[in-house]
Amino acid sequence: MQKIALIVGVTGQDGAYLAHYLLNLGYHVVGTSRDAQMCDDSRLDRLGIKGEIEIVSLAPNDFRSVLKVVSTKAPHEIYNLSGQTSVGLSFDQPVECMESISTATLNLLEVIRYLGGPCRFFNAGSSECFGDVVPIAPASEQTSFHPRSPYAVAKAASFWQISTYREAYGLFACTGILANHESPLRPKRFVTQKIISTVKAIKEKSLSTLQLGNLDIWRDWGWAHDYVKAMHLMLQAAQPSDYLIASGVTTSLRQFVEFAFEAADLKVDNHLESHSVHMRPADITFMSLNPSLIYEKLGWSSERSIREIVYKMYRDELF
């Protein structure tokens, strides 16, 4: 029997890559957007799968909307990739952030519990929940959360909702604690895509400088197409469990910028400026992660180096 996957937030970077991956595995993919008639399906189009996905309207923060779609489509697997995705934006819109992430997750869990079927549920978590992590003790699945943004607070709430429903009601529900992961499908409001697009403009001589905030922040960056494979693997396991999905390599934003200019064959010192206007109200300085458990249990590991990721983004290579 053909498996049915419901991807909540299919038009985003992760949703589009996951849809492409599942279609190649033979799934029937149903994707959701708040307005199926008006959604931005450009990422699906770029991946050549626009006509292969059934897109339906769903408002994740509306219980009735979630119930209608899940009961009608009867998916075997649900992937919740929706909600506000920008840490910076969450400081300006904290209420919308909490509703689009935490309330949406709760609605999906309640619908799955209410319908009582064998549906398996993946929720996209975030390594931002850990807060600052010192190099000598990389964060793992056992590390306590210390969120430092409304976005991270919402993701942490969703994580514990998943854990509670799994233990209390026996749902096959799990969270992938995702580190930063990039691709050419990233929206331009993300700093990594801003870097790439600005460096391209400098190369074309339409701009002369790249302006950023704090360059001395460190993150674990991976390749988005690799990470959706981990999402799928988590729902194929014998038992539900939460996993940290990361590369295990920490790189500074300054190094990311240097690789971008290197890809364009330009000298970074001639074009880079740091301005306080681009600083966030609170930011994580250092992020060090240990993803050994998902490799040990599921055999997954990140496949791309940070230099390769930056080069692929600059060259607009999707895979």
Image: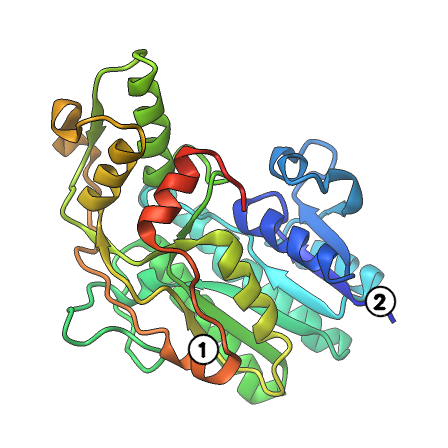
- Residue highlighted by disc 1: 294
Q: Is residue 304 left or right of residue 67?
A: left
Residue at horizontal 75 percent and vertical 79 percent from the top:
118
68 above or below 136? above
Residue 103 in the figure: left or right of residue 257: right
Residue for point 24% across, 60% down:
250
**Is residue 88 depicted above or below 130 in this figure?**
above
153 relative to 49, above or below: below
Q: Position of residue 319 (x, y in %)?
A: 54, 47
Q: Measuring 28% from the left and 77% from the top, which residue is drawn there?
A: 144
Amino acid at dot 1: Ile
Q: Note whether residue 12 is visible.
A: yes
Residue 62 visible: no
Between 189 and 104, the one nearer to me in the picture: 189
| Marks 1 and 2 close (CB-CB < 8 Å) | no
State the SS at label 1: helix
Which residue is disc 2 drawn over? 2
Instruction: Report the amino acid beneath label 2.
Output: Gln
